[in-house]
Amino acid sequence: MVAIRVPKSQRARRELLKHAPKLVETGKKTLILHGTKTSAVLNSALADIFHLKRDNAVKFSKKNDNIRPFESGGETSLEFFSLKTDCSLLVYGCHSKKRPNNLVLGRTYDHHIYDLVEVGVESYRSIESYVYDKKLAPKLGSKPFFAFIGEHFESVDELKHLKEILLDLFKGEVVENLNLAGVDRIFVCTAISPTTVYMTHCALHLKRSGTSIPRIELVEVGPSMDLVVRRHRLPVESLKKEAMKTADHAKKMKNVTKDPLQGKLGKVYIPDQQIAKMTLANDVKGLKRERREAKKNKEHSKKQKMNAE
Amino acid sequence: MAEAGAVAVAAVTNYEVDLGNLMAYDPSHHLAAASSSRGELREECLRKGTELAQAVADALFALPATEDRDGPMVHLPPLTTRFPREKHLPKPKPPTKWEQFAKMKGITKRKKNKRDWDEQTQTWKRTYGYDRVNDDRDIPIIEAKATDEPGVDPFAQRREEKKNRVEKQEKHRLENLKKAAKLGALPSHIQLAATALPITGTKADVPKKSRKKDLEDVAGMASSATASGGKFDQKLPGEKPLKNPGKHRKFLPVVEGRGMGNQEKQQNDKILNALLAKSSDDQMDVGKAITMYKVKKEKQRRKEKETSSASNKLKTQKKPLKKFVKKKA
């Protein structure tokens, strides 16, 4: 009965080390799966999302009937899959009469559900239905532009949340240096009502203009859909605070200043003296001992005197 | 949300541009009438998208670019919108028992060579693995010492000692891992068995086993129920003596320093109020009243903050599932 499991092969060990938490995080992986029933629209939507995120996404093909994201016990399967595939973004699709073409977008923190947004997919047009010049097709893995239009993204809570999740889902790897020749895609999201967002994916056509900044033209390539926000679950405050912690808060050394003349300086603070709570400084027992010894010495010296005499 | 990292001023409106994310947000756009057809909606969105994309591109191409062999590279500014991490921050490993000892003694690590000179066969042999230097099994003769008992097999003894050493090492390794796991800094190639942690909920939900210290303290807590403060209680064999036996008597200090109010006066006031009050409602403990008022105000303020910040429209169901499900509009 061993409570600790160690991988038996070096390959397994290397795979596990890849899953380790890093100080500065780069791209998140996505898990795409579906529930008991899916519709044709939902199937093509999930396939298209997988196509957009080919390199860092995992798509499950079996149906999973014990996943209910918004119920308290129904997310254990999702967390287990997230743990095993090391994915922190979830896209779960299920179709029912009450919620047709339902898509649940979620994020995990430490493989526990962090937050969820449930959207319904309407007026969906898949990638195949678009005809365009194949030379403009965006390459896999390029960093996309984002355009959010509409005041509702700021005023309505659900849309604010959806905006965060869409950014997280499609932004790809976090890089410091960007190759300007490699910008070729954009996600345009318009808030057409306080509950609906019209999202479309376009390729960027950089045209020559007089200045060094090219003129941009949008060509619709990818899926376009109406996302109707149904439910959402914000993260718990404590979890949110922990998840938003960044790595660069190095421990500040307090009370140390550097003076060019005197070197390192620090202040010594002496607390208030609590006279009421202090014990008396004189060692009472010691006092007794001193008196005793003084008396003894006096006796001794008296005896000596008497002896001398 | 969406504070401007580098605000690009477009011709007409002010867009919020987050260059680190290549994002542009137009907060002031009001969509035209909802009755516009699908095609017109598309056109409008594409047009607006083009404007925003142009704004981002303006800011992006304005950055100083270095020529790389693939093309011009720019250094993106740090992100303005903050995203949650996907995993916790890595915690530093606690030093193992040997590392602590080595630090205290000043022992530093030394590199061992892969091959070493073997005196017995006068060849270079590897330090570990098959056919290694100083292998225990290669010793042909062990000379008998004066302290050896007859009948004791020295080869078996050596094997026994090695086995003990290996077992001790394994025990120490597990103890080090347990210590690291307690601090949450388990090395990532080691997994705890599935029964160790619950799958849902945060780590804070795992019930902690009561520590030996806590169990010992509980016995001491019950002693406050006796009149003499547990001084004469019968103790079980092996139970530790109480930390603070006897009644707790508090005396007023002889010299009062600077502080809030005269303690002796307060003590006398309390007794007088209790004696002279006609009913128990008359006497008011001012300090207690102030504390109660403050707590109530704090709760109110907190509740107001929560209700005003949370959305009014689609509140999450925090109550447990009821037998019937209310149909929402």
Image (cartoon, helix red, strand yellow):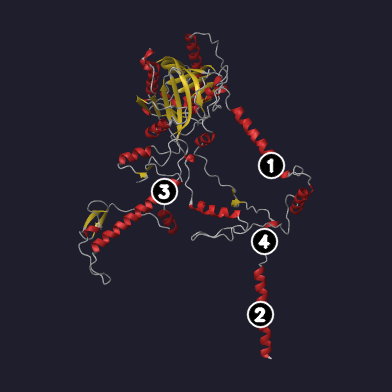
Residue B53 seen in the current view: no
Q: What residue would you read off at disc 2? A: A296
Q: The residue tagged with tag 1: helix, strand or loop?
A: helix
Q: The residue tagged with tag 4: helix, strand or loop?
A: loop
Q: Residues within 10 Å of mark 4 (few under 14, many from 20)?
A: few
- Distance from the alpha carbon under mark 2 to that under mark 1: 60 Å
Tag 3: residue type?
Lys
Q: What residue would you read off at disc 3? A: B178
Quarter of the rendering containing residue B121 = bottom left
Q: Nearer the viewer, residue B150 or A273?
A: B150
Q: Where residue B154 sits: x, y (%)?
A: 24, 64
Task: Read off the chain for label 1.
Answer: B
Q: Nearer the viewer, mark 4 or mark 1?
A: 1
- Distance from the alpha carbon under mark 1 to that under mark 3: 44 Å
- N-terminal of the pair, mark 2 or mark 4, is 4
Tag 2: residue type?
Lys
- N-terminal of the pair, mark 1 or mark 3, is 3
Relative height, residue B105 to residue A257 (above, below): below
Q: What residue would you read off at disc 1? A: B291
